[in-house]
Image (cartoon, grey):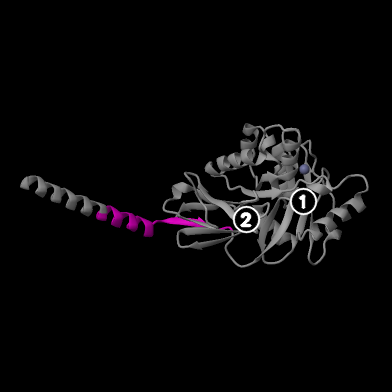
Amino acid sequence: MKFKLKLTVVCFSFIILLSFTVHLLSQESATNVNVKIMNPYAGSGFYVKGNTHCHNAPGNLGRELWDVVTDYRNKAYNFIVLTHYFWQNCSNYSSEDFLCINGQEMGHPLGHILGLGTNKEIDPDLDQQEIIDEIKRQGGVVEIGHPYTFRRAILFRLKGIDLFEIMNYGHDIIQRRYNLGIEPTKLQLELWDELLRKGEKVYAVAVDDSHFPYERGHYWVMCKVKSLDKASVLQALKSGACYSSSGPKMDFDVERNTITAYCHSSFPIKHMVVKTALLSRSSKNNFISFTVRSPVHKYVRFECEDEAGFKAFSNPFFISGG
Ligand SMILES: [Zn+2]
């Protein structure tokens, strides 16, 4: 009996010593990790609200375009990129507090590609990669329109994508109206995560894809800029200093290796989610943190949803070895 008691004490002491050592080691690896976090929201600036996928009816062009600009300005937007199916110069519609940026949607049969900030017409019948290359040649930003309509293999072959539409209001409406059972946002988030896991540096946008007045003002991007001008907005889009939203606001904080995202909404927060290449975790709070201990996570991004079903999505914080 005495021997049994001694053995139990020895075993317990060993377990306590072992767990203390493991704890110390894990603390050590938590503080001495060698990872580099690319924070797309670093630096000073203020957020401006915009829509990067916007149409105007081809009939009475001048009047229609004025209506589009007035409508978005009245909805407290700071910029739109005019991306109808042919290139138009809309810079005359810009003012001190509102930017109309030139662009075009190339309605290629294998999937639509948008050029933001381009300066002349691009032939939509070009090969898709040629379209992307031409947008870049003109100093524009490449956006994949409603990516769920692409064949996966074709999408993954394209090189030089800057922006990926994760939310597209026009397409959500089409799917709901015809009850097709497809959820564009869900599919687009899956495709986006797949690209990010492959190591592609692609940022997200939420867009109206507004063909009609009732489609305006539902999904948008908030971009962090130092001033409201075309170059700053395009640079923010290209470098990921924007988040996508249908309602909530987000902000972010990076302290050593810990990234925290906050969500603000006029409705109670339903949940927040953090996703990396390896894991997904959620919280009922209006903030969520993730401490990066290894570059294998590749990226960290955040989602937020409120009780009314409005959502917001951060861009990825890319992770590399230090
Ligand atoms: Zn469109």
User: Magenta segment, which residues?
Assistant: 20-40
Q: Which residue is mark 2?
A: 239
Q: Is residue 319 magenta?
A: no
Q: Kindly identify the residue that appears in the image at 66 percent across and 66 percent down.
A: 46
Q: Quadrant of the N terminus?
A: top left
The image quadrant that residue 189 belongs to is top right
Q: Which residue is mark 1?
A: 118
Q: Is residue 28 magenta?
A: yes
Q: Is residue 292 left or right of residue 228?
A: left
**Residue type pointed to by label 1:** Thr
Residue 316 visible: no
- Within 10 angstroms of label 1, few (less than 14), some, or many (20 or more) residues? many
Q: Quadrant of the C terminus?
A: bottom left
In front: 127, or 203? 203
Q: Is label 2 or label 1 in front?
A: 2
Query: Which percent across, then down, holds residue 53?
Result: 75, 48
Dot 2: element: helix
Query: Which percent across, then down, holds residue 239?
Result: 62, 55
Dot 1: element: loop
Ligand 1 has an atom within 8 Å of the beta carbon of the residue at disc 1: no
In front: 186, or 156? 186
Real-space Cα distance between discs 2 and 1?
17 Å
Q: Kindly identify the residue that appears in the image at 73 percent across and 64 percent down.
A: 228
In front: 54, or 106? 54
